[in-house]
Image (spheres, coloured by chain):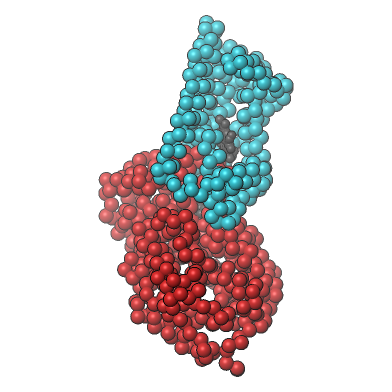
Chain colours: A red, B cyan
Amino acid sequence: MKKPVFDRKIEDIGLETGTSRLTPEKIQETIQNVLASETGAKLKVYHDTCVRCGLCSKACHYYVSHDGDPTYSPVGKVVQTMAVMIDKKGKVDADFIYRAAQIAYTECNLCRRCIHYCPLGIDTGYIMSMVRRICHKLGVTPQYIQDTAHSHSATMNQMWVKDDEWIDSLLWQEEEARDEFPDMRIPLDKEGADIMYSVIAPEPKFRTHLIYQAGAIMHEAGADWTMPTLHGWDNSDMAMFSGDFEIMGRLKRDHFERAQKLKVNRIVMGECGHAFRSVYDQGNRWLGWADYPVEVVHSVEYFADLLRTGKIKMAQKVKGPITIQDPCNIIRGRGLMEDLRYVAHAIADEVIEMTPSLEHNYCCAAGGGVINCGPPFKNVRVNGNKAKADQLRRVKEQGVDLCLCPCHNCHGGLEDIIHSNELGIDLKFIGDIIYANMVKTKAVEE
Amino acid sequence: MFNEIYELVTGPLAWIGWGIFLLGSVYKLASLWSLAKKKDTSSIYYTKAKFGLRSIAQWSLPFGTLGWRETPSVTVVTFVFHICLILVPIFLSAHVILWEEWFGVSIPALPNHVADVMTLLVIAGGTFFAWRRFSVPEVAFVTSGHDWFVLGVVVAPFLTGFLAYHQIFNYEVMIVLHVITGIAWLALIPFTRLSHMLVSWYSRAYIGSEFQGVRHCKDW
Ligand code: HEM
Ligand code: SF4
Ligand code: SF4
C-alpha cells in the first residue's frame, strides 16, 4: 500500500522562524540530550514494544473525524515523530521538526483516550509531550502558545495581566456584585481563610462575570474564602503544554506557595481542566511532589459538596434535558464523573448523556494546549472533531439545548464545533447555572 | 549428514538459543529496571500491585475493555493466537520428550490432534495479521520491515513443524528448519518487538496504577 504523505502543513510564524534557525547539529544534539537526560525506560519500553497493531486508532477523535486517515491515529502520530527521532538518533531535518511540532502541538490533545485501547498500556500522550519538549528546546513552538508561555514567565500569569489590573478586576466585580448582595466581599489576602480561590488568567481578562458568580456562590454558602492579590493567583499552566517544564515548575510552586503564605486549608479552583492536570499530574511531579502540598479541590467537587450539604439550594432547576461534556483532565484525569453527575442532576430536570461518556468521552479537541496554538490551527481542531459534532447532534435530536461544560478549554472548543456545525446548543459553566438558579437568601429583594 | 546437522541444531545450537533467550531476558529486564530507577522514579513510585493486577486481569478478559470491544475480530484472533502460541511449544508431545531429556522434568502432553489444530490456528492468526498489515490502512501505515520480520519468525516454527509432522515436502529439511526457526523465535524475544512478552506486564501495571491510583479512573 502506498503510504499517505503529510500534505497539511499550516503556516505559523512561530514554527517558521523556529525551524529557520535550526542546523542539523543543533537538532541532533538537542534530541539526543532530551532522550538521554529526560526520558528513560518508559519511553524505551513504549518504543521497543509497540507491536504496531493499530488498535489505538479508533480511540482518537482526529482519526475518527478524518474517516480513518491513518496519519491521525495515535500510533500513526508516533511513527511520524518520536519513533523516527529515536531510530535515526536525532538525524532529522528542519522540515521534519516542523511536521513533528505541528503533529504534537495541534493534532494531539494529550487526552489519553487511547490508553483505553492499547493492550500494552502505551501512553501516546506522554510520547507526544516528549516530542513537544524536544520542539520547545529547539525553539520550534506555535506562536500563540509560545506567547502564553512568555506571559507566564514574565508575569506569572497566562494573559499578561498586570498586578494592578488583577486587583482592579476583583474590586470591580465585588462592586458589581454588591448591587445584588449588599454585604458581599471578595476577601483579598485574608490570612488563615479556609479557602483560597484561584482562577485562570482568562477569567479576569475576558470572563470576569465568572468571578462575580463564584463570589456570589461563596457568599451565599457562607464560605470563609479569599483571593490573593499577588502572583500565584493564576492556576493555569500553558508552559506544561508548550514543553517548557522549567516554567511549569515555577508556576506550580508559586501557586502553592501563595496558598501556604495565606495559610489557607485548601485551594478551590475554578472550572478548568488543564489547571487541575497541572497540579495532580505534571507540575507536582516535576517539583518532586507525589501529590499536592496544599489540598486542591476542583469546582466540580466543591459545588457537589455545597449542594449535598445544602449550603446552596436550587430555587429552580433547568427545564428540559441537558447534556454533559466530560472534560478529560478532570474525568479521565481525576475521576470526578460521579460528582459531576450529582451536580448535573441537582441543577437540571433531566440529563441526557452523550455516547460515549464518562471516562470514555471524546476530548473537545481544544485541550492539551491546542486551542492556545491560536487561529492558524482553528480548523485543525474543528475539522478534527466531527466525532464530537456527531455526539452533540445525537443529543440535540433528543431535545438537548444546553450542554454543561465545566472547563474553559472545552468551552472554547465546543463553541467552535457547535458554531461551525450549526448545532444550536448553549454552553454553560456549572457556576452560570447555580448562580442564576440558586436560592439567594442574602440578595436584595427584587 | 542429516543426523549430524540434526544433532548440531538440537544440541549446541539449541543450548545457545536458550542461553540467549534466558540471559538476554534477564539482561533486558535488569537494564530496564536500572534505567527506570534512574529516570522514571515517579512511574515506579505510583505503580502498585493492587492496581496493576486489577488492570492485567481486566485486559486478560476478551472484550473486557473498551479497546477489546472496539475491534472484535482482532480481539478474538489475538487471544487465540497467543494462547496457542504459548501452549503448543510447551505441551506438544514431541517437545515434552525433549523437556524430559534436557531438563529432566516431565509434564503432561497435549493430544496430537489438538496440538495440530492449535498449530493451524497460529498459522491462521499469523495470516490474519499479515492481511491486516497489507490491507488495513491504520496498520499498513505503521508497518515496517521489523514487523514483517517478527511476524515471520513467530509463525515459521509452526509452519515448518506442521509440514514436518505431516511429512509434507522433505521431512528432514523441514525438521531442521523447524528447529532453527524455533531457536530464533526464542533468541529474538529479548531483542525485538517480541520483548512485549517480557515487559508489557509492567507497562500495563504501571498505566493501570497511574489511572486507578492517581487519576481515580479505570484504564479499560
Ligand atoms: C505472554 C505475554 C504476551 C502478551 C501479554 C502479549 C500481548 C500481545 C498483544 C496485546 C498484542 C497486540 C494485539 C495483536 O496484534 O495481536 C500482541 C501482538 C503480537 N504478539 Fe504478543 N503477547 C505475549 C507474548 C507473545 C509471544 C511469546 C510471542 C511470540 C514469540 C508474541 C508474538 C506476537 C506477535 C507476532 C504479535 C503481532 C501480531 C501482528 O503482527 O499484528 N507475543 N501481543
Ligand atoms: S488526542 Fe487523545 S486519543 Fe488522540 S493520540 Fe492524543 S492522547 Fe491519544
Ligand atoms: S494499540 Fe498500543 S501496541 Fe498497538 S499500535 Fe497502538 S500503541 Fe502500539
Q: Quadrant of residue B165?
A: top right
Quarter of the image containing the C terminus of chain A?
A: bottom right
Q: Is residue B103 above or below residue A109?
A: above
Q: In the rendered picture of this protein, how many numbered marks are placed on residues?
A: 0
Point out residue A178 in the picture as x, y percentages from the top left corner: 50, 89
Asked whether residue A58 appears in the rendered view, the answer is: no
Q: Quadrant of residue A157?
A: bottom left
Q: Is residue A433 left or right of residue A375?
A: right
Point out residue A160 in the picture as x, y percentages from the top left corner: 35, 73
Q: Residue furthest bottom?
A: A446
Q: Is residue A188 above or below residue B200?
A: below
Q: Residue furthest top?
A: B1
Point out residue B205 in the picture as x, y percentages from the top left corner: 55, 44
Point out residue A383 in the picture as x, y percentages from the top left corner: 51, 62
Residue appearing at x 67%, y 21% in the figure: B107
Residue appearing at x 33%, y 61% in the figure: A14
Q: B142 or A319, which lies in front?
A: A319
Residue appearing at x 62%, y 66% in the figure: A339
Asked whether residue A169 appears in the rendered view, the answer is: yes
Residue appearing at x 52%, y 43% in the figure: B203
Q: Quadrant of residue A239?
A: bottom left
Q: Is residue B184 above or below residue B31?
A: above
Q: A326 or B78, which lies in front?
A: A326
